[in-house]
């Protein structure tokens, strides 16, 4: 009898612990900032580990990585390469765009062929960004700080 009561108490404790952990995971949200106008936008400023994969017509160029520092002023942002890549020097601009409350509204990647329109998606927890230049390249960025 004592054994079954201990087992039941342990099961209830583990169940409550599981609910608490799940609730904590759900409360992690994308960072935001409030503009002087009162508009709230996502905050993607900071350091990002960036993995670049050339695809489609650029697939021969391969894969490489860099670290990107995103500097955000209001709803506009610019990304700077902190580590050289095979085609760009450290300190050069890698992306630019605009954010709103829902994520990335406008995005251009600065490639060896010049600026190219791209599509960006911020992960639900705000710790990843995926970027796609259709049939040319994709990047996965993971927040470092």
Image: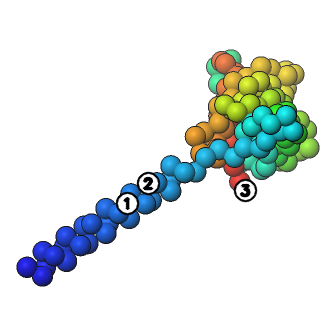
Rounded to the nearest angstrom, the CA distance separating label 1 from label 3 is 27 Å
Q: Nearer the viewer, residue 36 or 25?
A: 36
Residue at 50% from the left image edge and 49% from the top image edge:
26
Which residue extends farthest bottom?
A: 2
**Mark 2, secondary structure of its residue:** helix
Residue at the image position 91 percent from the left and 44 percent from the top: 91
Quadrant position of residue 60:
top right
Say which residue label 1 marks.
Answer: 18
Residue at mark 3: 145
Question: In the rendered structure, are the residues bearing label 2 and label 1 in contact, judged by CB atoms less than 8 Å apart?
Answer: yes
What is the x, y in percent for residue 83? 83, 47
Q: Which residue is mark 2?
A: 22
Is residue 38 shown left or right of residue 3?
Answer: right
Compare marks 1 and 3 and give the one earlier in the sequence.
1
Q: Nearer the viewer, mark 2 or mark 3?
A: 2
Q: Residue 30, how many percent across, how many down?
A: 65, 44
* Residue occupying the point 37% across, 60% down: 18
Q: Quadrant of the N terminus?
A: bottom left
Question: Residue 118 at x, y = what percent?
Answer: 73, 23
Q: Mark 2 to mark 1: distance in Å? A: 6 Å
């Amino acid at each position: 009898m004592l054994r079954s009561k201990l087992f039941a108490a342990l099961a209830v404790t583990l169940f409550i612990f599981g609910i608490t952990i799940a609730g904590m995971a759900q409360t992690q949200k994308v960072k935001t900032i409030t503009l002087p106008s009162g508009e709230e936008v996502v905050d993607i400023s900071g350091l990002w580990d960036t993995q670049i994969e050339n695809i489609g017509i650029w697939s021969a160029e391969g894969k490489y990585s860099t670290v990107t520092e995103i500097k955000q002023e209001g709803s506009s942002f610019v990304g700077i390469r902190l580590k050289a890549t095979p085609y760009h020097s450290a300190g050069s601009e890698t992306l630019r765009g605009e954010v709103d409350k829902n994520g990335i509204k406008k995005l251009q990647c600065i490639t060896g062929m010049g600026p190219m329109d791209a599509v960006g998606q911020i992960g639900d927890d705000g710790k990843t960004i995926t970027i796609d230049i259709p049939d040319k390249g994709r990047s996965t960025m993971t927040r470092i700080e």
